Image (tube, rainbow, N blue to C red):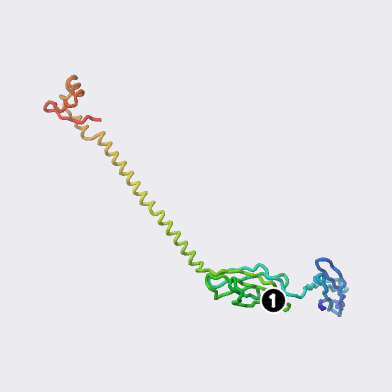
């Protein structure tokens, strides 16, 4: 049997009280209670699961009725509910954080326990208790599989445990990440370092070929040979038949009369 007290402030102080009960299925007013002045005490005994729910208490005097009732929640006595959303975070080589979410029913007598095992082992290695479902576990071995059992406890028993498996790191994550970034930057610089010198050599080679070709072409068009062509004496322009003989017999040029020079024909 439960005794629930409801006390109000009122003026005038002559107050009449009213109680009601409600659950997910129905609502009724057959609640036993006694009243004296500004105070009322209800006697309530839950006998089945339907008897757990919410009790409401109102006060009323000559001015009017209380607008917002006093509310009391009746919950069954028993072990706490199973914890929810248990997760691991901040995993390092030697530590880990385990965090869970409490159930909707809060109990001042509630506390939270954690047990640690080696994975695939039944021998408990570590135990701790906390008023909140948050745990920081240290002094762990690197690269090791652990299993953590987390549960809530009150004076009526304990909840079903939630199992969380964690493997600690082999190496510090920060150092590995920095080294990887440094290696990436070095590889990039090596792969592209040949582009600048190669491009410069190609441009220089192209310029050299262009200037060389221009010089050769200029020599052929206006070199010393052509200058000599202009200086050939008029006597070289012989009769037509002599010119034809020169054209028809290239070797004849080697037997030119004295005073004439051989010249390369102008292009």
Find residue 143 and report its horizontal and vertical position in percent: 53, 70
- Secondary structure of the residue carrying tag 1 is strand
Quarter of the image with the N terminus in it: bottom right
Residue 129 picture location, percent across and down: 64, 77
In-front residue for pair 256/137 = 137
- Could you tell whether 221 is left or right of 112 in the image? left
Q: In this view, does 227 lie to the left or right of 148?
A: left
Residue situated in front as seen by the camera: 140 or 30: 140
Hey, which residue is sitting farthest left in the picture?
Answer: 258
Identify the image quadrant of residue 230: top left
User: Can you identify the residue that label 1 sits on?
Assistant: 153
Relative side of 113 to 49, left or right: left
Screen quadrant of the C terminus = top left
Q: In this rendering, is residue 221 above or below 161?
A: above
Q: Quadrant of residue 211?
A: top left
Q: Position of residue 6 (x, y in %)?
A: 81, 76
Q: Position of residue 111 (x, y in %)?
A: 68, 76
């Amino acid at each position: 049997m439960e005794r629930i007290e409801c006390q109000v402030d009122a003026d005038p102080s002559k107050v009449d009280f009213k109680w009601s009960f409600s659950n997910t299925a129905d609502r009724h007013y057959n609640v036993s209670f006694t009243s004296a002045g500004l105070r009322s005490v209800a006697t309530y005994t839950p006998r089945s699961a339907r008897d757990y729910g919410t009790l409401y208490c109102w006060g009323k005097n000559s001015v009017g009725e209380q607008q917002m009732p006093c509310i009391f929640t009746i919950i069954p006595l028993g072990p706490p509910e199973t914890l929810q959303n248990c997760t691991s975070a901040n995993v390092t080589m030697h530590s880990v954080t385990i965090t869970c979410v409490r159930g909707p029913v809060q109990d001042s007598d509630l506390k939270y326990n954690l047990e640690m095992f080696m994975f695939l082992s039944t021998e408990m290695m570590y135990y701790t208790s906390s008023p909140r479902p948050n745990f920081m576990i240290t002094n762990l071995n690197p690269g090791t599989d652990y299993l953590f059992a987390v549960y809530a406890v009150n004076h009526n028993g304990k909840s079903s445990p939630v199992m969380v498996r964690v493997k600690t790191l082999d190496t510090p994550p920060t150092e590995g990440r920095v080294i990887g970034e440094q290696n990436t930057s070095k590889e990039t610089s090596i792969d592209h370092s040949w582009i600048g010198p190669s491009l410069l050599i190609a441009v220089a080679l192209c310029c050299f070929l262009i200037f060389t070709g221009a010089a050769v072409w200029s020599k052929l068009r206006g070199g010393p040979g052509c200058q000599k062509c202009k200086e050939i004496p008029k006597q070289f322009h012989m009769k037509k038949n002599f010119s034809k003989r020169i054209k028809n017999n290239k070797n004849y040029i080697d037997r030119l009369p004295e005073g004439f020079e051989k010249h390369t024909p102008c292009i």
